[in-house]
Image (cartoon, rainbow, N blue to C red):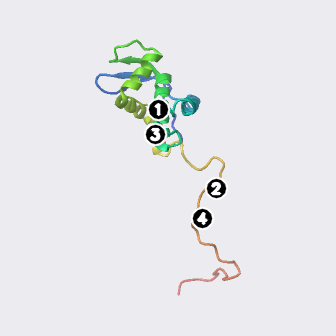
């Protein structure tokens, strides 16, 4: 059975007296943030990667930049109030907070998505493939013998 998460904003305690009040993540919001991060990455790869001396085909570059873009996108979407940060809550300030505080940004990312990870870990929101097949699965069972090879026992098997 799937447990639904809270639909109310919550406070995330990070560190050094920093608290962020965040709205809950939804599937449409997560998908939109991911699509926007991919668009920004593609634009960067096409127009700026070469001048920055980075190879967008390098998987570690792609993973790192995509993670950074996702964290910033999630923060821009989620943060609706904060404490312990000496700035007005504006998009530029949220982006600056994420850019300038990589450890707190990573902590925000993990704590913000922790409820989703916990539900997945307990088997909540995971299960068989929705289409009912296991197309990529490897067969591990040995083939069954032909039914003509040996008749099924019908009598008492105990001596």
Is disc 1 placed on a helix, strand or loop?
A: loop
The Cα atoms of the two marked residues, 4 and 1, are separated by: 47 Å
Q: Earlier in the sequence, mark 4 or mark 1?
A: 1
The Cα atoms of the two marked residues, 3 and 2, are separated by: 25 Å
User: In the rendered picture of this protein, how many numbered marks are placed on residues?
Assistant: 4
In the picture, measured across the screen, residue 105 lies left or right of residue 36, that is: left
Q: Nearer the viewer, mark 4 or mark 1?
A: 1
Residue located 49% across and 46% down the image:
123
The Cα atoms of the two marked residues, 1 and 3, are separated by: 34 Å
Q: Earlier in the sequence, mark 1 or mark 2?
A: 1
Which residue is the site of mark 2?
Answer: 135
Which residue is the site of mark 1?
Answer: 52
Residue located 37% across and 24% down the image:
100
Is disc 2 placed on a helix, strand or loop?
A: loop
Residue 54 x %, y %: 47, 37
Q: Is residue 136 visible?
A: yes
Residue located 33% across and 22% down the image:
18
Q: Are marks 3 and 4 in contact (CB under 8 Å)?
A: no
Q: Name the residue furthest right.
A: 148
Q: Is residue 11 visible?
A: no
Which residue is the site of mark 3?
Answer: 117
155 relative to 97, above or below: below
137 relative to 156, above or below: above
The Cα atoms of the two marked residues, 3 and 4, are separated by: 29 Å
Label 1 crowd bin: few (<14), some (14–19), many (20+), radius 10 Å: few
Which residue is the site of mark 4?
Answer: 139
Q: Nearer the viewer, mark 1 or mark 3?
A: 1
Q: Earlier in the sequence, mark 3 or mark 2?
A: 3
Label 4 crowd bin: few (<14), some (14–19), many (20+), radius 10 Å: few
Label 2 crowd bin: few (<14), some (14–19), many (20+), radius 10 Å: few
């Amino acid at each position: 059975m799937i447990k639904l998460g809270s639909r109310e904003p919550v406070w995330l305690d990070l560190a050094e007296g920093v608290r962020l009040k965040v709205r809950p993540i939804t599937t449409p919001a997560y998908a939109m943030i991911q699509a926007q991060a991919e668009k920004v990455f593609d634009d960067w790869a096409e127009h700026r990667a070469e001048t920055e001396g980075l190879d967008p085909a390098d998987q570690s570059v792609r993973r790192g930049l995509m993670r950074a873009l996702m964290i910033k996108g999630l923060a821009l979407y989620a943060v609706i109030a904060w404490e312990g940060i000496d700035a007005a809550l504006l998009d530029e300030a949220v982006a600056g907070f994420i850019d300038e505080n990589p450890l707190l940004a990573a902590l925000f990312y993990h704590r913000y998505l922790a409820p989703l990870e916990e539900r997945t870990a307990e088997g909540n929101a995971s299960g068989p493939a929705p289409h009912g097949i296991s197309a990529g699965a490897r067969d591990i069972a040995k083939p069954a013998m032909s039914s003509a090879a040996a008749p099924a026992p019908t009598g008492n098997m105990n001596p």
